[in-house]
Amino acid sequence: MSLNNLNEGQDSFLDIIANLVGVLIILVVIVGAQATSGLLAEPDTESAVAQQAEEAEQDLAFETQKVNLQAEQASRELVSSKLRLDLARLEMQANDEKRLAQQLATRRHTMLMQLEFVRAKHEQRKKEVRDELNQQQQKQLELQSEKIQLVSQLESLEKSINAVSVTQIETSVETIDHFPNPIAKTVFSNEIHFRLDRGRIVHVPMDQLIEQMKGEIRLKAEKLKQADGTRETIGPVNGFRLQYELGIVPDSQTGQPNARVVRFKRFTIQPVSSDVGEPMEQALQEGSHFMNVLSRLEPRRTTVSVWVYPNSYDSHAKLKDWLHEHGFQMASWPLSAGRPISGGPDGFRTSAQ
């Protein structure tokens, strides 16, 4: 209900009150007039006057009741108007709250969508960072492994260089007090050697050649009574020859100034032909000589040492992958072009990769 309806109800109530007051005034005037006329009337008219007074009193009661009913109706209409106004106000408030709730729901949905977008973006970034870290760690592990391999190869090369260096010795030979074994068997245990040159791989019978050399050293030492050193050759064994050198050096352990001892200086191993071995592609096939040699060995307890030349690094990579796949440990000995396999008193024990 609008304010205009409320004002109209209040005006109706005031009009009823004014009418009631007017009726009361008229009745008072009538009663006063009748009372005045009654004083002047004759006794036989007293009944008529009494009847008129009674009728006037009934009319006054009726009008009074009518006015009361109208006032009550106006009051009820006023209350009804207020209730309708309150209802309209409540409806407007409910609509405002409903509209606010819809706005809040829309805002909440928007915020949830933004939050989900941020969460998805954060998860994607975490995954990218994790993948990047994994790649970096993997690269660091590869670099560390390569570093260890290169350090091992460098140490082996330094030992080989030191082994083949020729030292100056004295020419006089007085006595030979003792003859130590120059090479220990444990240097070559659980290790098999191959030579890789121009893409062709061949088994080097290192153990057999070394064993024959050790058996001959004591006999060949007799030559050192007349010379400062000797160079001997063994083989060929499976297409390879071994050449070794013996020399005499002062013996510092006895304390005698003229005491001398036989020392092993170095050895070299070379093939009898440059075309020995089989191509790498053929060697990795079933039935090849390479496969037959490895079939007699236990992979987990065997280190495959490969003497490789610069012209065969590609074949070396293929061989490395194949050996690792089949459970063999591998050690690499890079050789410069034209340089033979060699060793000395310190040996050439490799570090498995």
Image (cartoon, helix red, strand yellow):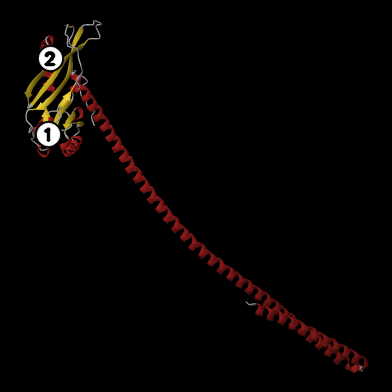
As drawn, the residue found furthest toward the right would be 40
> Could you say which disc has been placed on residue 162 in the image?
none
- Mark 2, secondary structure of its residue: helix
Q: Which amino acid is tagged 1?
A: Ile
Q: Which residue is rendered at x = 13% and y = 34% of the image?
A: 197
Q: Which residue is mark 1?
A: 201
- Mark 1, secondary structure of its residue: strand
Marks 2 and 1 sit apart, C-alpha to C-alpha, by 30 Å
Above or below: residue 177 compared with residue 234? above
Can residue 295 be seen at all in this image of the molecule?
A: no
Above or below: residue 284 compared with residue 115? above
Q: Which residue is rendered at x = 10% and y = 15% of the image?
A: 216
Q: Residue 182: x, y in percent? A: 18, 16
Q: Residue 179: x, y in percent? A: 17, 10
Q: Which residue is mark 2?
A: 217
Q: Residue 284: x, y in percent? A: 12, 37
Marks 2 and 1, the one that precedes in the sequence: 1
Q: 159 or 88: which is nearer to us?
A: 159
Q: 22 or 110: which is nearer to us?
A: 110
Q: Which amino acid is tagged 2?
A: Ile
293 relative to 47 in the view: left or right: left
